[in-house]
Image (tube, rainbow, N blue to C red):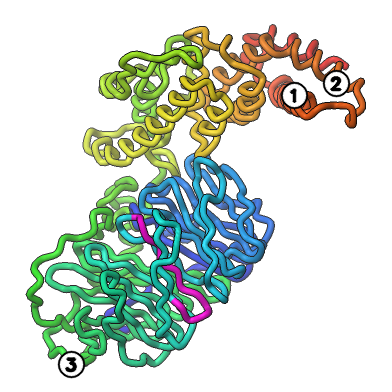
């Protein structure tokens, strides 16, 4: 299995058809997504051959995909041109975007998370806003399909490479092209920005790597021809090195940035069909994933297994050679890079034994979080996080549905249009978060963003295990707080339609649940209008299908309020407008009629979902008045 310093960690059949794309998650490095021509996306844990989840519903083969920085959202591009956005926390599609006229070939997330870019065979680069669920910028300019996209570390630039042999750099703030590099003689396959310097590397089917200075917009050099096309490029800035990794089908090479034509190190690999690379610090391991038909292969290259050699060319022997120390000083590892245990892959020939040992009952269990250890790479047992979920629920939703606040609930909701003095966002949240709630005597399953988005945790968690989840928990709370702040802003402006839009994308059922509880407790439902009702009912209908009893109860309570407040108006409007020929309706009347029909359909779906023969008896008895009200409302 060992191939001169690089070895295969695992390979397995991933799809029923051909695998067309695969990407690692950037935060933990232990999550992998793959897509194929079977129109499925499968989510894997590195080291395991069984998928953690399978996402279906795509209308054509999956051509490209990418995780967001928190590994909570997955964007999928399809051959038909559409783009799907998946919420991995709730394992459901959050939305489908119209995308491109032809196949979507590449997608990439912005470093700050709320935006992503897509490239297509229609030659256009599009920038998307997840909050608005729409394209906010389109950049035409390539004469052939776009194959590679990368954002700069500061987020103001984006680089694209296409089958027209060109590399283009775009300024997102100015909304225009900055530079067009045209020195490559073949299609562009890969791009990489330097993490700290204004440098851009590009790899191509012309078998070369080129380095571009983004201050002078000049070419700083080109590598010698490799034996096959360059599949990927990546900057490697560990310790005193400032080099570029380039991967062809049969060789992994290291080139110094100031002398790109020289090759300081090389290692034989068999990585045809390479899809993604991930550097793991500080152990200096390189993870790679490639495809072959319906199979996925995961590889490891040890960048520490090098012997001293000259700087003139490739080394001999089984390992990589370390170049002489450079004078540019020590460079820190990227802040969100993963970590692998030092003993993780030190025995390439015994990689299978390592996996077997780690997957055994004596393997220490850990959870998904940077830094990554090899125990994580081998997929820990699934456990149940009752305590953590209860603690989070207390900090976000309160222990009782009648007195809960919105996340960061120092921001009081008032009727639209009225000013709020000293909203105090975040102060109450931090205090509440320190006090865990006690288990409910009713036995309800407590909701909340799972600290472990892909499984349940052990019933007994020690302090160390909980502490390990703190960074990820902070990320969840920050996202919820930001979403709540946007809702608060629109509420004060009286723009209730956008309140529904913010709740929907990215959809977080905990935020929606807290919104409903806060509005109900403070009696603010009188400020709602028909627009808000039509925007909220579809979200409440989805909330009723939650696996958490608390969420279901909150959705039912708020839906009952909406039925009482708008039921008569909806019925009267539908009855009155149904007697008017469509051609005689004005635009405002027609729009109101459509909203009332949408509300009616949502209430009808709720009736079917919750009050069928198989519905819970507790729900049926507690919401008997709601059931009666729905039956009267839906009566022809």
- Image quarter of residue 217: bottom left
- Quarter of the figure that contains the N terminus: bottom left
Residue 414 disc label: none
The nearer-to-camera label among 3 and 1 is 1
Residue 161 percent coordinates (x, y) = 46, 73
Residue at 75% in and 13% down: 569
CB-based contact (under 8 Å), mark 1 and mark 2 = yes
Residue at 30% in and 24% down: 426
Q: Is residue 563 above or below residue 244?
A: above
The residue wearing badge 1 is 592
CB-based contact (under 8 Å), mark 2 and mark 3 = no
Q: Is the residue marked by circle 2 packed among few (<14), some (14-19), or many (20+) residues within 10 Å?
A: some
- Image quarter of residue 223: bottom left
Q: Is residue 588 above or below residue 94?
A: above
Residue at 43% in and 82% down: 182
Element type where label 2 sits in the image: helix
Q: Is 461 left or right of 186, judged from the image as shown?
A: left
Which residue range is magenta in the image? 155-166
Q: Is 498 left or right of 436, judged from the image as shown?
A: right
In whole angstroms, how far apart are the C-alphas of marks 1 and 2? 9 Å
303 in the magenta segment: no
Looking at marks 1 and 2 on the same chain, the residue that comes earlier in the sequence is marked by 2
In whole angstroms, how far apart are the C-alphas of marks 2 and 3? 83 Å
Residue 577 disc label: 2
The residue wearing badge 3 is 312
CB-based contact (under 8 Å), mark 3 and mark 1 = no
Residue 554 percent coordinates (x, y) = 55, 18
Looking at marks 2 and 3 on the same chain, the residue that comes earlier in the sequence is marked by 3
- How many numbered marks does the figure carry? 3
Q: Is 203 left or right of 369, judged from the image as shown?
A: right
Element type where label 3 sits in the image: loop
Q: Is 481 left or right of 104, judged from the image as shown?
A: left
């Amino acid at each position: 299995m060992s191939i001169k310093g690089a070895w295969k960690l695992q390979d397995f059949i991933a799809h029923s058809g051909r695998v067309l794309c695969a990407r690692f998650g950037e935060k933990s490095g232990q999550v992998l997504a793959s897509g194929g021509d079977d129109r499925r996306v499968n989510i894997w844990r590195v080291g395991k051959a069984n998928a953690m989840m399978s996402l279906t519903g795509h209308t054509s083969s999956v051509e490209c995909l990418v995780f967001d920085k928190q590994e909570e959202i997955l964007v999928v591009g399809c051959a038909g041109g559409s783009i799907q956005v998946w919420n991995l926390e709730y394992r459901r599609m959050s939305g489908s975007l119209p995308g491109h006229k032809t196949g979507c070939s590449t997608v990439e997330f912005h470093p700050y998370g709320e935006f992503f870019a897509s490239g297509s065979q229609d030659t256009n680069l599009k920038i998307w806003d997840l909050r608005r669920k729409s394209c906010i910028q389109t950049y035409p300019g390539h004469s052939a399909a776009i194959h590679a996209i990368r954002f700069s570390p500061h987020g103001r630039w984006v680089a694209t490479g296409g089958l027209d042999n060109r590399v283009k750099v775009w300024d997102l703030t100015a909304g225009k092209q900055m530079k067009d590099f045209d020195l490559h003689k073949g299609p562009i396959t890969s791009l990489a920005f330097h993490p700290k310097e204004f440098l851009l590397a590009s790899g191509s089917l012309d078998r070369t790597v080129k380095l571009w200075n983004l201050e002078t917009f000049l070419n700083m050099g080109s590598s010698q021809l490799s034996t096959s096309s360059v599949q990927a490029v990546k900057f490697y800035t560990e310790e005193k090195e400032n080099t570029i990794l380039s991967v062809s089908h049969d060789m992994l090479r290291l080139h110094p940035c100031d002398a790109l034509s020289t090759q300081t190190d090389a290692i034989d690999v068999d990585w045809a069909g390479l899809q993604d690379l991930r550097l793991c610090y500080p152990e200096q391991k390189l993870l790679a994933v490639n495809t072959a038909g319906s199979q996925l292969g995961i590889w490891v290259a040890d960048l520490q297994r090098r012997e001293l050699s000259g700087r003139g060319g490739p080394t001999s022997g089984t390992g990589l050679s370390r170049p002489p120390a450079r004078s540019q000083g020590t460079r820190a590892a990227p802040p969100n890079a993963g970590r692998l245990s030092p003993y993780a892959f030190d025995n390439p020939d015994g990689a299978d034994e390592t996996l077997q040992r780690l997957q055994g009952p004596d393997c220490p269990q850990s959870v998904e979080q940077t830094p990554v250890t090899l125990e994580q790479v081998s997929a820990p047992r699934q456990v149940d996080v009752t305590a953590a979920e209860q603690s989070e629920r207390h900090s976000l939703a309160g222990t009782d549905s009648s007195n809960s606040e919105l996340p960061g609930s120092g921001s009081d909701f008032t009727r639209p249009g009225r000013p709020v003095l000293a909203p105090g966002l975040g102060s109450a949240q931090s205090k509440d978060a320190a006090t865990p709630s006690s288990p409910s005597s009713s036995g309800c399953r407590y909701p909340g963003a799972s600290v472990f988005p892909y499984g349940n945790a052990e019933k007994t968690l020690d302090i160390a295990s909980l502490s390990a989840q703190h960074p990820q928990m902070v990320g969840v709370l920050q996202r919820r707080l930001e979403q709540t702040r946007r809702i608060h802003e629109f509420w004060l402006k009286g723009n209730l339609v956008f309140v529904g839009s913010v709740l929907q994308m990215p959809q977080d059922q905990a935020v929606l649940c807290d919104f409903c509880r806060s509005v109900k407790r403070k009696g603010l439902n009188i400020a709602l209008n028909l627009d808000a009702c039509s925007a909220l009912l579809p979200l409440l209908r989805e909330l009723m299908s939650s696996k958490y009893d608390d969420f279901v109860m909150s959705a039912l309570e708020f839906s009952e309020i909406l039925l009482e407040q708008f039921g008569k108006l909806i019925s009267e409007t539908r009855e009155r407008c149904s007697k008017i020929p469509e051609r005689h309706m004005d635009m405002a009347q027609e729009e109101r009629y459509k909203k009332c029909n949408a509300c009616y359909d949502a209430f009808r779906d709720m009736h079917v979902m919750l009050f069928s023969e198989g519905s819970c008896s507790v729900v049926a008895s507690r919401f008997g008045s709601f059931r009666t009200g729905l039956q009267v409302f839906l009566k022809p």
